[in-house]
Amino acid sequence: MADENEQNQTGHEDEPNAQPVPSDYENESLNSNQPAPVVPQDKKPGLFSRLKNINPYIGLMLILVATGIGVIIFLTVANDKNELSFTSTSLSEEDINNLASSQAEIASNVDLLKIAPNTVFDQSVIIKKNLEVVGDITVGGSVNIPGIGTTDGTQLEQANIAGDLAVQGNSSINGNLNIQNNLNVNGNMTVQGEFLVDTLSANNISFPGDLVLKRHIKTESGQTTSSTGTAVGGGGTTSVSGNDIAGTVNINTGSGTSSGSLISVSFRENYAKTPKVLITPVGANAASFNYYVTRNTAGFTISAASAPASSSNLQFDYFVIE
């Protein structure tokens, strides 16, 4: 028996992986043929067990730090974008009414709202602040701008109007007005200062005050016509060079002159009433006999009270005014 115990002890010592047996089991192992029980080894704690052992205040602090780092990363990425992008969508009439009733703001004051090109607004657009347009503006309908041209309203530095410009009310121009083409005025035109024109064409001009002309008076009213009277004698001829306002009459007398009509001048356009005709003899021959003038709205006639000299040249300048 003693030999068997010694063999058992010797056998346990020779095993390299044998665990030491506690003293409580030594006597039982000696007195029994059963093998000694193996003591279980301790297991390592899991992740959940470790989290349970962490101080709750330390865990809360870790959560707050992780949240702050996430917010900083999000703001950094968001600031790298220069413009806001919006997904295009269609707004129904109900959506537009909801936006109008709720006074919704699409963007804040520091954001940029970029609208895709060819955007159509079916209803009114109200802009409460300044409107800056970099490109051209094309208006298909009428433009109503109350207060344009006033000192407290809209002011235009430059305006190019390719089509017609219709102004229903009064217009005040403080600077120069340059008109490259025609100017048609249907009503009255009042000029307080100096009125300078290169060429003035008018059907009727009325001057309530004095008319001061610093240059020559030139008349262009169309060529007049004439007919020869019987007083010029045989072989006599007449002609006229001028218009309805002024000109020169040329008379070449023949033989056997007499008193009576020398030349009759017909106006190109009749006067409204009988005009005044001023006759001036040119040279001594025209002033050597007695002459007189008769006139009406259609023309005038130069006649001789006494027979002029035969085979002589007579010239008269005339000026007609109504």
Image (cartoon, rainbow, N blue to C red):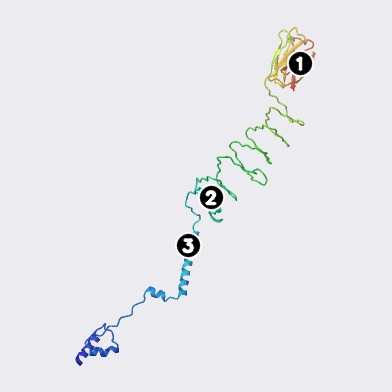
Mark 1 or mark 2, which is nearer to you? Answer: 2
Q: Judging from the image, what secondary structure is the residue with disc 1 in?
A: strand
Residue 282 is left or right of residue 31, and the answer is right
Image: 294 above or below 24: above
Q: Residues within 10 Å of mark 1 (few under 14, many from 20)?
A: few
* Badge 3 vs badge 1, beta-carbon distance below 8 Å: no
Q: Which residue is mark 3?
A: 74
Closer-to-camera residue (87/182): 87
Type of the residue with mark 1:
Thr
- Residue type marked 2: Asn
Q: CA distance from mark 1 to mark 2?
A: 87 Å
Residue at 48% in and 64% down: 71
**Mark seen at residue 97:** 2
Q: Residue at x 49, y 59 (%)?
A: 78
Q: Position of residue 160 (x, y in %)?
A: 60, 40
Q: Position of residue 66 (x, y in %)?
A: 46, 68
Query: Disc 3 or 1, which lies upstream in sequence?
Result: 3
Quadrant location of the C terminus in the rendered image:
top right
